[in-house]
Image (tube, grey):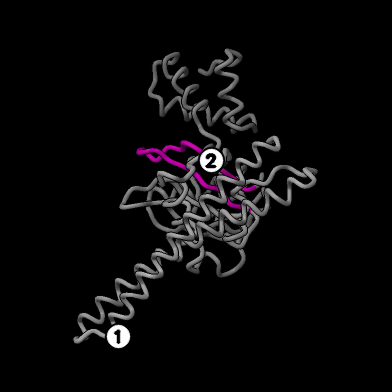
Amino acid sequence: MATGGEVGDLMASAERKAAVARVRSERESGHAELHEFRAGQAPTEVLRDVHLRIAEIHRSTAARHLTAAQLQDDYVSRLRDWSRTRNTPQPQFMSGVAAACGTSSAAVTLVGAARDQLGLAASDEPARAAQELEFLLGEGPARDATSEVRPVTAAGPALADRWPGYGPAVAELGIGAVAAVPLSLSGTCVGALAVFDPVQGVTDSDTFSEVAEALTRSMILSSDGDPGLYGATDLRAKVHQAAGMVSVHLDCPVTDALELIRAHAFAEGVLDHSVAERILRGELRLG
């Protein structure tokens, strides 16, 4: 749990980011208005359409910056309310992300160039457990969203039809619907935003994609953002370090070592992090 000073620092950081995002949104809206005015004054239909298309781009960018500001404002509000009593767990930034997407459960998965999972941030335990299942089983919505670089949705029986291992397992968590959208910029995918049991229609609206874009451009890839999502991102460094040790011990590829760790964790019904920590402490040898 953060101290009073640490909470104050988090709030101040989020307030700064909100202010920057709001200024950027207003600037983009101004550009949009200018091109809409020019469209009305255009001497030809071709020029009119060009200005309208440019205005649409600026409007979309303004909406994304405004969403980023609202996410920061929500985080500040949650921290402020919590700091008055501190009788509940400290709120996470991802809780606001989930709420913006019409659910209480959402998770961000960060991936490397080979689409291997590098980090995870979740709003609650069901979301974290669902993402851990993806890592252990090697299938699921976030994995498909990052590999195919497109939105993925499934609900009810379609969960098991699409993911024979993940579908039944996530259903046991009480989750009946999932959706994921890639976090990408200029053709580079850095992860996915997944939501669980969202309200109907949210994942088909602009809101879902705007939240994903806000996270990608304003937090994860921005020079003045915070890819760790205010310390909420659980990096997979220990798992990959343990995989390296297993790889050397068994003289096998690191990818095979990762699969061994996942299989062992699944067989024991524990998280892969737990297995990795035991390997690093010398308490467990695989193979």
Q: Residues within 10 Å of mark 1 (few under 14, many from 20)?
A: some
Nearer the viewer's eye, disc 1 or disc 2?
1
**Compared with residue 236, is residue 86 higher up or lower down, i.e. above or below?**
below
Q: Which residue is mark 2?
A: 120
In the picture, measured across the screen, residue 163 lies left or right of residue 86, that is left
State which region is magenta. Answer: 105-123
The numbered disc on residue 137 is none
Q: Is residue 209 visible?
A: no
- Residue appearing at x 52%, y 33% in the figure: 235
* 112 in magenta: yes
Identified by mark 1, the residue type is: Gly
Give the structural element (helix, strand or loop) at label 2.
strand
**Compared with residue 177, is residue 163 higher up or lower down, i.e. above or below?**
above
Q: Which residue is mark 1?
A: 40
Rendered location of residue 71, percent (x, y): 56, 56
Magenta-drawn stretch, dominant element (helix, strand or loop): strand
* 287 in magenta: no
Q: Residues within 10 Å of mark 2 (few under 14, many from 20)?
A: many
- Residue appearing at x 44%, y 45% in the figure: 224
**Compared with residue 9, is residue 51 higher up or lower down, i.e. above or below?**
below
